[in-house]
Structures are given as structure tokens and as C-alpha cells.
Image (cartoon, helix red, strand yellow):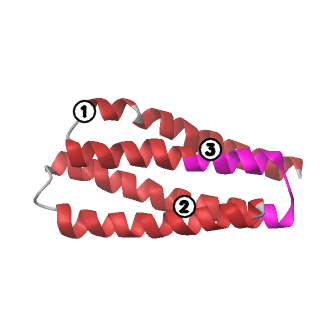
Amino acid sequence: MTADRLYFVLGAVNGLAAVLLGAVGAHLLKGRVPAELMGAFETGAHYHGLHALALVAVGLALSNWDSRWLRVAGVAFAAGILLFSGSLYLLALTGVRWLGLITPFGGVAFVVGWALLAMAALRS
């Protein structure tokens, strides 16, 4: 599979997952999870969906020009989804507070991804 298709598929699958997890949060977890932890879950789903779109953008950009910057941006976005959203989902579902220590690493990955996306555009 080419890199452009890979990132497009990763974005689409993550978009699907974000919608499904958002629905789980809205319909199955409300009232079962404390409000504070529900907020964490919703934040995870929100950033998950936004960065699924970022992965689609990387895939579309790669279809027009091949760039190492773009490829690494895609890795950063995927890592951010896993670390940021994943840690918030697990925190909300388990109540294990130390999982919140992982979340900022995902946030940094998101920031790096956006910076690399901009760099790719400037260097193209």
C-alpha cells in the first residue's frame, strides 16, 4: 500500500473509531462514569476526531507530493491519537489517575504533527 493510501485509510478508520467511541460515551457511559471522567472521555473523542482528519489531510497531501516531513507528521498524529486520546479513554473507563501522565506526551505529538505539516508545505 502506498503511503498516501495508508494515511488516508488510517484517518478514515480513526474517524470511524472516534465517532463510535463518542457514541459509546454519549449513550453507554453517561451516568455510569463520574462527570469529571466523562469530560476526559469526551475530550479524547474530540481530539481523536480532529486528528483523524489530520491523517486524511496527510494522505491527501502525500498524493500530491512525497515528503519525509509529511510521513513523519502522519506518524506524530497517529502517536498523538494513541497517547492522548487513548490515555483519556482508559482514564475515564478505569479511573486509574496515573494514566493522565501519558496524555501530555500525546499533546506534544499533536503539536509536532502540525509543525511538521506546516514544514512540509513550506518545503514543497
Type of residue at label 2? Ala
Label 1: few (<14), some (14–19) or many (≥20) C-alpha neighbours in 10 Å: few
Q: Quadrant of residue 113?
A: top right
Question: What whole-number distance in Å separates the C-alpha atoms at marks 1 and 3?
Answer: 24 Å
Mark 1: which secondary structure? Answer: helix
Q: Quadrant of the N terminus?
A: bottom right
The type of residue carrying mark 1 is Arg
- Residue ID for mark 2: 52
Helix, strand or loop at disc 2?
helix
Residue for point 26% across, 62% down: 25
Identity of the residue drawn at 48% across and 47% down: 82
Does residue 10 appear to the left or right of 86 in the view shown? right
Pinpoint residue 8: horizontal percent, then vertical percent.
66, 66
- Image mark for residue 97: 1
Mark 2 and 3 residues: CB-CB less than 8 Å, in contact? Answer: no
Coordinates of residue 26 in the picture (x, y in percent): 24, 67
Q: Which residue is labeled 3 in the image?
A: 76
For this view, does 58 lie left or right of residue 99?
right
In this rendered view, identify the residue nearer to me: 1 or 104: 1
Q: Quadrant of residue 24?
A: bottom left
Dominant secondary structure, magenta: helix
Residue drawn at (53%, 67%) of the image? 13
Q: Are marks 1 and 3 in contact (CB under 8 Å)?
A: no
Span highlighted in magenta in the image: 61-78
Q: Compare marks 1 and 3 and give the one earlier in the sequence.
A: 3
Please say if 107 is above or below 49: above
